Amino acid sequence: MNIKGGMEEWSYAEGQHPLRRTSYISLIKLNAADNMYFFTLVLGLWLLPKADALQCYECLPNIYGSCTDTTSECPSQDYQCAAARVTSFIGDSKISDFTFKKCAQAKDCFKGSFNYGISQTRINSSCCTGNLCNTKPAPYSGLVSNGRQCFTCKGTDCTQPLNCEGSEDHCIKATVTVGGVTTILKGCTSMQFCSGDAIAQTAHMTGVDVSCCQGNFCNSASGPIGGLLLLTVPLISFILFS
């Protein structure tokens, strides 16, 4: 049996209910509702207020340690405003103290140091999440012994114990070749300086072979000390400017 319905013709066998037309109309209504929902969702997302990247102070010191604050927009919303301080020592004497300001990711906001016994470099950085919130320099970071110990070198003796300080939770060994003479540095360091990227950056910039380990006196190897400050610049560069 055939039934005329507008522009369409619907057929059904005798004894069956004419449900095809009703189902088809319901499907059209359902698709229209879905399309309207999708359109409303997309329109709502498009009209959401844009989250702008932060504006931060930037201050990158020259070789004399001085700089002037400027403002810059961070590369993306993943960045925060940061202030950092890098302080280096020979023995108990402070030989440099640099302060930085810039945009940074959360992973770059930490306190860390690397310590070769006779020399030590400390980094203290902090982040904040408001526009131009990094007005003050990072504070000076004093360190105390944390109970861990690593080998260090004194003269040609590289089996001397060194008390690790602050967040220094790894032992470090660096092999340095200068003018055909190979020397070894040993000491304590924080885990940030033992990442694969930091070690690769150091090797690329200086040719120094660096290895880290965890556990008291795990950096056992013989060799004289030398080139104490050779690792400072590439490691600081990686942490502060990457």
Image (spheres, grey):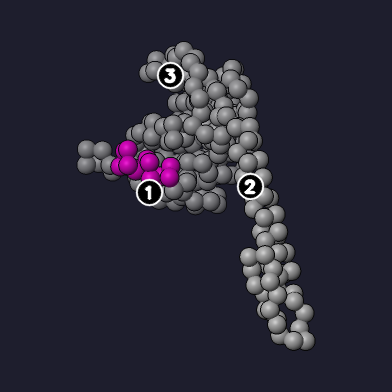
> Callout 2: 10 Å neighbours few (<14), some, many (20+)?
few
Q: Quadrant of residue 143?
A: top right
| Mark 1 crowd level (few <14, some 14–19, many ≥20, 10 Å Cα) | some
Q: Is residue 193 above or below residue 134?
A: below
Tell me the mark number nearer the camera, choosing from 3 and 1.
3
Q: Nearer the viewer, mark 3 or mark 2?
A: 2
User: Residue at the location (49% across, 51% down)?
Assistant: 213
Is residue 189 depicted above or below 232 in this figure? below
Q: Which mark is residue 222?
A: 1
- Counting from the top left corner in percent of width and height, residue 208 is at 33, 42
| Predominant secondary structure, magenta span | helix
Residue with the mark numbered 3: 61
Instruction: Inspect this view and state whether residue 197 appears.
Output: yes
Q: Position of residue 22 (x, y in %)?
A: 74, 69
For residue 110: magenta? no
- Is residue 145 in view from this perspective? no
What amino acid type should be assigned to the residue bearing mark 3?
Pro
In this view, the residue in front, 130 or 69, is 130
- What residue would you read off at disc 2? 39
Q: Which segment did they paint magenta?
A: 197-208
What residue is drawn where x is 56% and y is 34%?
77
